[in-house]
Amino acid sequence: MDGMRRALPLLFSLAALLALPGPGWGQIKPDETLVFIPTAGYRDVAGEGWMVPIHGWVFEPETDSVTRAAFLGLFRNLFGRDWSEEEQGRFRARARMFLVDNEGGKRIRVRIGTGEFAVGVSEPDGHVRATLRVGGETGPTVTKVPVPSLDYAAISPEGETREFPGAVQLLEPTGVSVVSDLDDTIKVSQVGEIKELLANTFLRPFRPVAGMAETYRGWAGAGWGFHYVTASPWQLFPVVEEFLRDQGFPRGSVHMRQVRWIDASVANLFASSSEVKRPAIQELFRTYPQRQFVLVGDSGENDPELYGALSRAHPRQVAGIFIRDVGRGTNPERLDKAFEGIPLSLWRVFEDGRSLAAIAEGLFAGSK
């Protein structure tokens, strides 16, 4: 999200003073919370069980009203106008995730079926990751949605009444997976206009691109897996997850930009969207070497160039590329260069979900 990376340093300079790791080691405290990020699992070597990636984030919500007021004032100055009560409430809800105290040193365990697994200890940025082998002996419940998914939950400290659930989609070695961008691909963001981008991100309800959820649900109904890959920072994950759920987009793994304001990872804020998304997509290619991938993005950022380069590097895995025309960056010269050496039968430009569904149907029908 190139526009965002230019604007956020101005808005969140205060966050460097706030996003300090929590001092406590051990269990999650009552004033802390745990969020699990959706992931995608794969078959183990023997093909009898599943390798289940777990990705959690532990943090303490920011409650300092003085800091929040200063943060609000800094953002409002960029707009030069007063906000409605609804806008103020929405900003507080979304911006607070940039002000949380990330909690390192929290030992996380999960229950999958009848089995209990140690995930590990959260890092200073609050994130914890591990890949667990889950066999049939644990009796996990697999939900058909229609892509199979596995639900799990954290083992909470004694006396804790809150539940911390998570889910992972289970993808077979072969099949089709959709890699989808978010901003201006399935969600209206207006990345090229800084004030509009910030307003759409922090002040307004998220708006879906017309017809995209319906088209994706149709693909999911055919058994396709989904991976949402975006250059937006993890701090926006809760509201992104809410958007995907409320708009009826299929379940899928989520991959976002890692930014922590007090260490070297803040440099990621200045990385281009391609630098952020490329390694995530390449990792998917490595994890599922026999699956076919459909790449969906937009012309507002570097998706054409990124997807073209990935297709040339992995010609056997990229089955199709679809670029949404956002009114800029779709000139023929740019697209011809981005997709140089790639047959026109493999890529198309679309306007909304309805046109995407029609174009994709024709492209895949012609490839049979």
Image: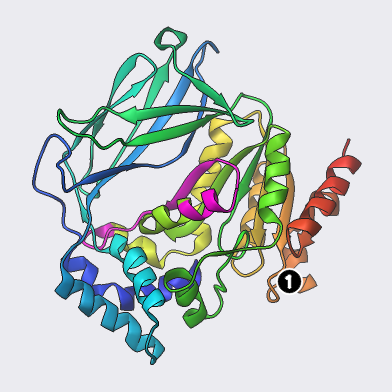
Does the magenta run of residues contain 86? no
Is residue 1 toward the left or the right of residue 97 in the image? Answer: right
- The residue lying toward the viewer, choosing from 84 and 280, is 84
Which of the 4 quarters of the picture holds residue 86?
bottom left
Q: Is residue 256 magenta?
A: yes
Left of 5 or right of it: where is 119?
left
Q: Nearer the viewer, residue 334 or 68?
A: 68
Q: In which quarter of the image is residue 35?
A: top left
Q: Residue at x 60, y 65 (%)?
A: 184
The quadrant where residue 56 appears: top left
Query: What is the crowding at mark 1: few (fewer than 14 residues within 10 Å), some, or many (at least 20)?
Result: some
Measured from the top left, where is residue 168 in percent x and y? 47, 32
Q: Position of residue 23 (x, y in %)?
A: 8, 47
Residue at 15 percent of width and 31 percent of height: 159
**Front position in the image: 129 or 252:** 252
Residue drawn at (22%, 77%), measured in percent from left and top? 69
Which residue is label 1 attached to?
A: 330
Residue 335, x across and y down, in percent: 75, 66
Q: Identity of the amino acid at label 1?
A: Thr
Q: Which of 30 and 351 is in front in this view?
A: 30
Q: In this view, does 185 lie above or below 125?
A: below
Residue stretch in magenta: 242-264
Up-down: is 279 above or below 146?
below
Measured from the top left, where is residue 167 in percent x and y? 45, 33
Q: Is residue 211 visible?
A: yes
Residue drawn at x 75%, y 47% is 320
Left or right: where 24 falls relative to 276: left
**Disc 1 secondary structure class:** loop
Residue farthest top in this picture: 137
**Quadrant location, the C terminus:** top right
Residue 343 seen in the figure: no
Q: Looking at the picture, does residue 198 appear above or below residue 265?
A: below
